[in-house]
Amino acid sequence: MGFFKNLFSKEKKEKLDTGLQKTKEGVWSKITHAVAGKSKVDDEVLDNLEEAFITSDVGVDTTLKIIDRIQERVARDKYVSSSELNNLLCEEICDMIVRPTNEELGDFELKETGEPYVIMVVGVNGVGKTTTIGKLASQYKKAGYKVILGAADTFRAAAIDQLQIWADRVGVPMIKQQMGSDPAAVAYDTLTSAKAQGADVVIIDTAGKLHNKIGLMNETSKIKNVMKRVIPDAPQEVLLVLDGSTGQNAFEQAKQFIAATDVNALAVTKLDGTAKGGVVIGISDQFKVPVKYIGIGEGLDDLQIFRPEEFVRSLFLNTTEK
């Protein structure tokens, strides 16, 4: 489906800028304060920048890396004016962010393998997991793929009902069983149906409670092992959904889930309602797992493929600089 490949459109860029506005305003005010009255980037500017990034939820370790990089550039280039700082920040931060895989593909475009592409979604309740699944289904369907959902969060009747609402809204089939059923059995049924119906994309919801590490490992391993009986490579994507508005709390969730499961992609949601969007930079750097999707609004199209350059430029550059 190469004809769906596209560039970063003006409309998507405008949505990204709007969605990151609160974070941008927070970061901008802090950086502006950091360089106020300064003609060049000196130690005082760097100290102020350090404080600005830490209070923007970039995280201490990532902030120190950024400051070290800026110090090296200042030392190498001998003189760096404060007016050059934003471009410098863009270059250095983009270089730190873990790159999403298959960047050569268009938005929501998949390599053709002859098997359904299976996304297993994990994350705690309340982070926007079900909403993210619905938006993913919508985007892949819009891209021309046949999508099936699997309601493997069987611990809460509400979880099954909420996913059904999204399936109906998007217009895709959903496989479910009764509350309390074995989640692995639901996943098995979903993949079996997907193969029989010639589906392209399968999205499996899983329980939204934060287990202890052993419980989480055992449950996700069981689901994955059962899916491999149907599709040997499944799940090709284990997607951890994080709420960007929780700042440092998202770091802790990422730490626990990544330690317990084979997470290979992240979705950071609710960035439009928070000034804590810097958490995307910190999480990508600290855990070396690519952020694949970002949520920047409530609309079906407001789940975007994460593009590091566009994200960073949206945060740090004036409209005239972009």
Image (cartoon, rainbow, N blue to C red):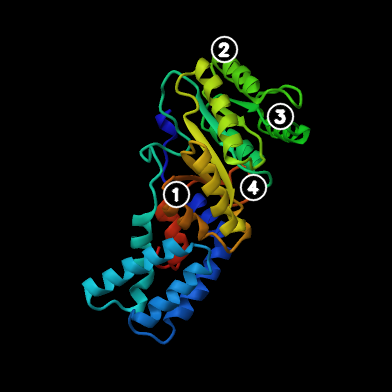
The answer to whether residue 138 of the structure is visible from this angle is no
Quadrant position of residue 246 = bottom right
Disc 3 vs disc 4: which is toward the camera? 3
Q: Residue at x 55, y 20 (%)?
A: 226
Q: Amino acid at mark 1?
A: Phe
Considering only vertical position in the picture, is 301 above or below 35? above
Q: Residue at x 49, y 38 (%)?
A: 263
Residue 225 left/right relative to 5: right
For the residues labelled 3 and 1, the Cα–Cα distance comes to 29 Å
Q: Which residue is mark 2?
A: 196
Residue on which the image places disc 1? 287
For residue 212, side relative to residue 176 (left or right): left
Viewer-closest of 165 and 64: 64
Q: Calculate the distance from the C-alpha at mark 1 to the C-alpha at mark 2.
A: 37 Å
* Distance Cα–Cα, label 1 vs label 4: 19 Å
Badge nearest the viewer, 3 or 2: 3
